[in-house]
């Protein structure tokens, strides 16, 4: 039996999927940045300077160019993974390593007890601009809510 859907329903489904996807401009920018290679890989390879605060065989951490808190570090796997959407089971230990490094650095920076935030941005709606997975370690003062909460009526 063949199911026949009304054209208006098909258009609604197609529009909904498109509305939730990345914009054309973002896709173009992302594709170009992936083609050029990650700025973080250039830091790892010492092609670009950085204030490196930690490094081992798998992970590097450094101070970003634009600070968003008194303590702000980027914790980056040396393996170039564009987004969380691109991780695999084989990356499980590496991702755990990022958290252990974050814990160590938070203690070294004196913010492990007062509190800190770990954040990753994935794709357009989250504001990802470097397509090499990385974790922000933020702290050193009260950070407030991560985002403005939606009113109950929107849920």
Image (cartoon, rainbow, N blue to C red):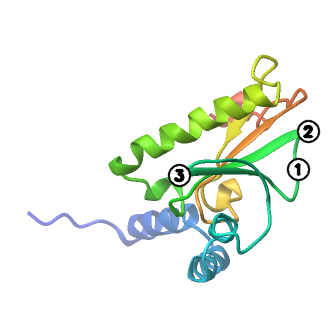
Mark toward the start of the polypeptide (2 vs 3): 3
* Front position among marks 2 and 3: 3
Q: Is residue 115 above or below residue 150?
A: above
Q: Secondary structure at mark 2?
A: loop
Of 86 and 111, nearer the camera is 111
Residue 8: percent from left, percent from top: 43, 68
Q: Which mark is residue 57?
A: 3
Label 2 to label 1, Cα distance in Å?
A: 7 Å
Q: Which residue is mark 2?
A: 70
Q: Is residue 106 above or below residue 77?
A: above
Q: Split into 4 quadrants, where in the image is the N terminus?
A: bottom left
- Badge 2: few (under 14), some or many (20 or more) residues near its Cα, within 10 Å? few
Q: Secondary structure at mark 3?
A: loop
Of 150 and 101, nearer the camera is 101
Q: Secondary structure at mark 1?
A: loop
> In the orientation shown, which residue stands out farthest toward the left?
1
Label 1 to label 3, Cα distance in Å?
A: 26 Å
Residue 87: percent from left, percent from top: 43, 54
Of 107 and 92, nearer the camera is 107
Q: Residue 46, located in which quarter of the rendered image?
A: bottom right
Label 2 to label 3, Cα distance in Å?
A: 27 Å
């Amino acid at each position: 039996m063949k199911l026949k859907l009304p054209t208006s329903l098909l258009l609604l489904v197609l529009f909904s999927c498109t509305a939730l996807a990345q914009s054309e401009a973002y896709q173009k920018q992302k594709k170009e940045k992936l083609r050029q290679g990650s700025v973080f890989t250039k830091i790892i390879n010492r092609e670009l300077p950085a204030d490196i605060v930690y490094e081992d065989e798998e992970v590097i951490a450094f101070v970003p160019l634009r600070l968003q808190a008194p303590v702000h570090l980027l914790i980056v796997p040396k393996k170039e993974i564009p987004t969380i959407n691109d991780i695999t089971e084989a990356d499980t230990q590496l991702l755990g390593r990022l958290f252990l490094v974050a814990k160590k650095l938070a203690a070294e920076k004196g913010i492990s007890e007062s509190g800190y935030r770990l954040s990753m941005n994935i794709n357009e709606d989250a504001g990802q601009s470097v397509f090499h997975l990385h974790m922000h370690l933020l702290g050193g003062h009260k950070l407030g809510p991560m985002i403005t909460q939606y009113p109950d009526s929107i849920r």
